[in-house]
Amino acid sequence: MSGRCSALAVFMLAAAVAAHGALVSQDVMDLGIMASRAPTADAKEALYMMLIDAAPGTEEAAEAYWALSNLYLDGFSEPREADAVRVLEIFLKRCPESRWAGQAADRIEQLKGQAALPAPPTLD
């Protein structure tokens, strides 16, 4: 995570808590926006995790779980399927009623199915 991005996120969270005693919905939305616009995959990952920890059970946290699974599949130089499955399984335990739950279950099944497939033959 870039130092500037992480420092800004920590400052934003501290200011929100100082002003309101807790995060309010605008703070959570701002954190989600920061995460989606972060300059690196590592920064996005850290900010999505912050959002999940700061606002558990909210729709924004549910969206952050989904975005994090997308990031693990498409945002790094090598896809991180095991991390995507792990975060989606946690999501389903914490947010089983979310509008994303069906898609998360489908994605887990798909990713686990892909992992069971034999590796394609190499071309010599």
Image: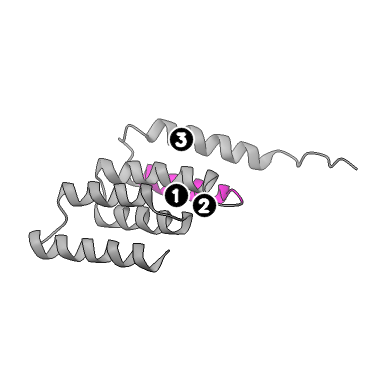
Q: Report the side of 94 relative to 107 (left or right).
A: left
Towards the viewer: 103 or 24: 24
Relative image position of residue 85 (x, y in whole percent): 51, 46
Residue 105: mark: 3
Q: Disc 1 on helix, strand or loop? A: helix
Q: Report the side of 86 relative to 94 (left or right).
A: right
Towards the viewer: 47 or 39: 39
Q: CA distance from mark 3 to mark 1?
A: 11 Å
Q: Residues within 10 Å of mark 2 (few under 14, many from 20)?
A: some
The quarter of the picture where the N terminus appears is bottom left
Front: mark 3 or 2: 2
Relative image position of residue 13 (x, y in whole percent): 22, 61
Q: Residues within 10 Å of mark 3 (few under 14, many from 20)?
A: some
Could you tell me what secondary structure mostly forms the magenta stretch? helix
Q: Give the mark, 3 or 1, whose residue is nearer the N terminus.
A: 1
Q: CA distance from mark 3 to mark 2?
A: 15 Å
Q: Which residue is mark 2?
A: 83
Towards the viewer: 41 or 112: 41
Q: Which residues lie in the magenta part?
A: 78-93
Q: Disc 2 on helix, strand or loop? A: helix
Kind of residue at badge 3: Ala
Kind of residue at badge 1: Val
Say if 68 sits above or below 105 in the image: below
Relative image position of residue 94 (x, y in whole percent): 33, 46
Q: Is residue 74 magenta?
A: no
Q: Is residue 87 magenta?
A: yes
Residue 87: mark: 1
Residue ID at (19%, 52%): 27
